[in-house]
Structures are given as structure tokens and as C-alpha cells.
Image (cartoon, grey):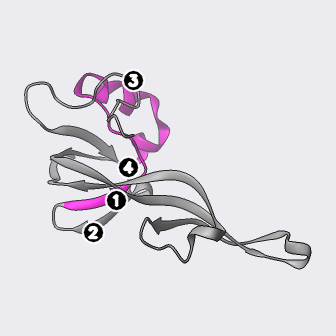
């Protein structure tokens, strides 16, 4: 995710002719945080691989929106939360919760599942 590599071919997802990054998103992996921004744990997809991703990914076949993104920053993690139980055995308290980097009170009981990025300068491309 840090290197903005395509989820299909593993090459750079950033468009070489512009500074924009194509991003295929579904409702289940995207949370809007502003008019042109949002959070996701899904990696980008280069322009060449968009057709392949739409053809091969059942999740994208059911629901997708294609955006171009101007910039990204890491926002936190998607995580499972726990609390100490009897004999300090961890007890699950929440599943797939967004935990921002600055929410340090949750960090001791957090098990990260996926990195979450904040996407900025999003423009709807299709459908």
C-alpha cells in the first residue's frame, strides 16, 4: 500500500502521464470522509488492469466505483479489539474497527488486520 502498487499486476498504479492514481472501490471497503476524500483498505489498480480486476473479482462485479485520486496518506488500521480476560486471556470485543494512528488508548488492545489509507482529491470516473 505504501508504494501504491496495482493490486492485480504489482506494478506502479500511478498514471505515468498524470499524478493521478486510479482506484476501484466498493461500498464495503470505502468510507467517505469529505466531499473529495475517503478511507479505504483496498489497494489501487493501474489503468491497464482495471478491466481484468472487474472481470475476475466477484466483489467488484457486484458493486464498484472508479475514482482518480490525487494523493494518499496513511490514516490507521482496520483491527480487531480485545480486552484482558481471566488469567489475562484476550477476549474479543470488536471486529474490523477503524483505529486511527492518534487513538493511542486503543493501541494496547488492538490487533491490526489491514492498513487504512486516506484518499484525497478523489474524482468520480465511472459508473
Residue 47 to residue 93: above or below: above
Contact (Cβ within 8 Å) of mark 1 with mark 3: no
Contact (Cβ within 8 Å) of mark 3 with mark 4: no
Contact (Cβ within 8 Å) of mark 2 with mark 3: no
Residue 105 to residue 97: above or below: below
Q: Is residue 100 left or right of residue 22?
A: right
Contact (Cβ within 8 Å) of mark 2 with mark 1: yes
Crowding around mark 4 (Cα neighbors within 10 Å: few <14, some 14 to 19, many 20+) is: some
Q: CA distance from mark 1 to mark 3?
A: 21 Å
Closer to us: mark 2 or mark 4? 2
Label 4 residue SS: loop
Contact (Cβ within 8 Å) of mark 1 with mark 4: no
Give the residues drawn in magenta, as a range.
37-63
Q: CA distance from mark 2 to mark 4?
A: 20 Å
Q: Is residue 23 left or right of residue 105?
A: left
In-front residue for pair 78/122: 78
Looking at the picture, how far across and down is residue 86, in whole percent?
A: 90, 78
- Which residue is denoted by mark 1 in the rendering? 39
Contact (Cβ within 8 Å) of mark 2 with mark 4: no
- Which residue is denoted by mark 3 in the rendering? 10
Closer to us: mark 1 or mark 4? 1
Mark earlier in primary sequence (1, 3): 3
Amino acid at each position: 500500500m505504501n508504494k501504491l502498487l496495482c493490486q492485480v499486476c504489482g506494478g506502479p498504479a500511478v498514471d505515468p502521464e498524470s499524478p493521478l492514481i486510479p482506484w476501484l472501490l466498493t461500498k464495503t471497503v470505502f468510507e467517505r470522509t469529505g466531499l473529495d476524500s475517503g478511507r479505504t483498505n483496498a489497494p489501487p489498480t493501474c489503468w491497464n488492469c482495471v478491466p481484468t480486476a472487474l472481470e475476475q473479482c466477484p466483489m467488484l462485479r457486484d458493486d464498484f466505483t472508479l475514482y482518480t485520486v490525487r494523493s494518499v496518506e496513511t490514516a490507521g488500521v482496520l483491527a480487531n479489539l480485545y480486552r484482558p480476560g481471566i488469567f489475562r486471556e484476550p477476549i474479543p470485543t470488536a471486529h474490523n474497527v477503524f483505529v486511527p494512528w492518534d487513538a493511542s488508548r486503543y493501541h494496547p488492545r488492538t490487533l491490526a488486520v489491514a492498513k487504512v489509507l486516506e484518499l484525497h482529491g478523489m474524482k468520480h470516473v465511472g459508473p
